[in-house]
Amino acid sequence: MKKELHIFFTALMFYTRIPCPATIDHNPDYLNKATRYFPIIGWIVGSVAFGVYCVFNYLVASEIAIIFSMIASVLVTGAFHEDGFADVCDGFGGGWTKEKILMIMKDSAIGAYGAIGLVLLFLLKCQGLVQLIDVSDTKFIIYNSQFILLLLLVSAHSISRLAAISIVFTHQYSREDASSKSKPIAQSYSWREVVGAFFFGLVPLVVLSYFQWQILLVLLPVFLTRFFLARYFQKWIDGYTGDCLGATQQVCEVVFYISVIALWKFI
């Protein structure tokens, strides 16, 4: 149990800005094992986003509360995944060879592709959340709509993280020298990491399916997106980097919101 707690706190330390016990160190072996708990980070981030939304929803308009909710999720993670998304936009937008793409992504400066990509990403995420809340309030009027919203946000963050970390299970790390401008990432795994990641990633959506089983269908577009992103990364850089995983998480989160909205139009 003590070892598992250490592994969990390792995941919390690397993927969030939440303070951890001083005894938690930068152990590469524990970082590899921490992939099993990566979707639980989604539980935490989704819950924080939900809590901030609820507080501000009592004070201001729902749309403004959503923006504060997005700010909270960025602060909790330190913009870890958003930074990866911006780097991927810059790297694949401005590079035409593997070496050039990796060099651009390693640069800490943000370029035009990254800035434009982030603006569009946040617009999609904000509008997606606005519609998601409106539809859920109507769709689940006989249930506690706030609890449904909590499950939706937690599911979006956990499944998108599952989609991202699953690339580690199927592809190779791209940088031959294992260099990175930021935190290291997991590069090996065992069956425990695979089972743990899928279990913790899918639990919130399975709970949500109790209220409406068709919600499980959103897994199809999310993992199709993951499949095409992974294939795109493989084509250009022969694998993945930490930035690629961050970009996958962000894109799959938005795809989740859009997919739920589209699904509810037909059921």
Image: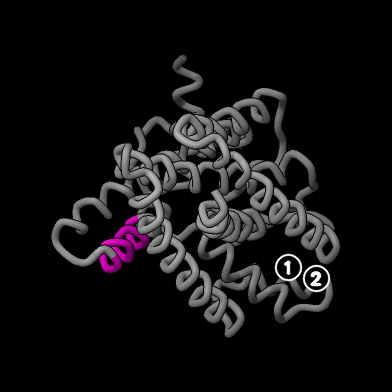
Magenta range: 63-72
Instruction: Give the side of residue 24 with respect to residue 121, left or right.
Output: left
Is residue 10 in view from this perspective?
no
Instruction: Please report the residue visible at 49 percent of the width from the left and 42 percent of the height from the top.
Output: 155
- Towards the viewer: 266 or 56: 266
Gap between marks 1 and 2, in whole Å? 5 Å
Main SS of the magenta segment? Answer: helix
Question: Residue 31's spot in the image, x, y percent?
Answer: 58, 36
Disc 1 marks a residue whose amino acid type is Leu
Q: Residue 12 location in percent, x, y?
A: 44, 39
The x and y percentages for residue 224 are 72, 52
Q: Residue at x 70, y 52 (%)?
A: 226
Answer left or right for 239 relative to 184.
right
Circles 1, 2 touching at the beta carbon (< 8 Å): yes
The answer to whether residue 86 is visible is: yes
What kind of element bears circle 1?
helix
Colouring mode (rainbow / by chain / secondary structure / one colour)? one colour
Please tell me the numbered disc located at residue 99. Answer: 2
Q: Is residue 182 above or below residue 21?
A: below
Residue occupying image coordinates x 58% and y 28%? 199
Q: Which residue is mark 1?
A: 102
Is 68 in the magenta? yes
Instruction: Let me know if residue 222 is in the magenta part.
Output: no
Residue count near mark 2 (Cα–Cα under 10 Å), binned few <14, some 14–19, many ≥20: few
Tag 2, which secondary structure?
Answer: helix
Q: What's under tag 2, amino acid-wise?
A: Glu
Q: Which mark is residue 188?
A: none
Query: Where residue 179 sits: x, y (%)?
Result: 68, 57
Q: Is residue 262 left or right of residue 148?
A: right
Q: Nearer the viewer, residue 7 or 57?
A: 57
Give whichever of 87, 138 is nearer the camera: 138
In the rendered view, would you say 205 is above or below 49? above
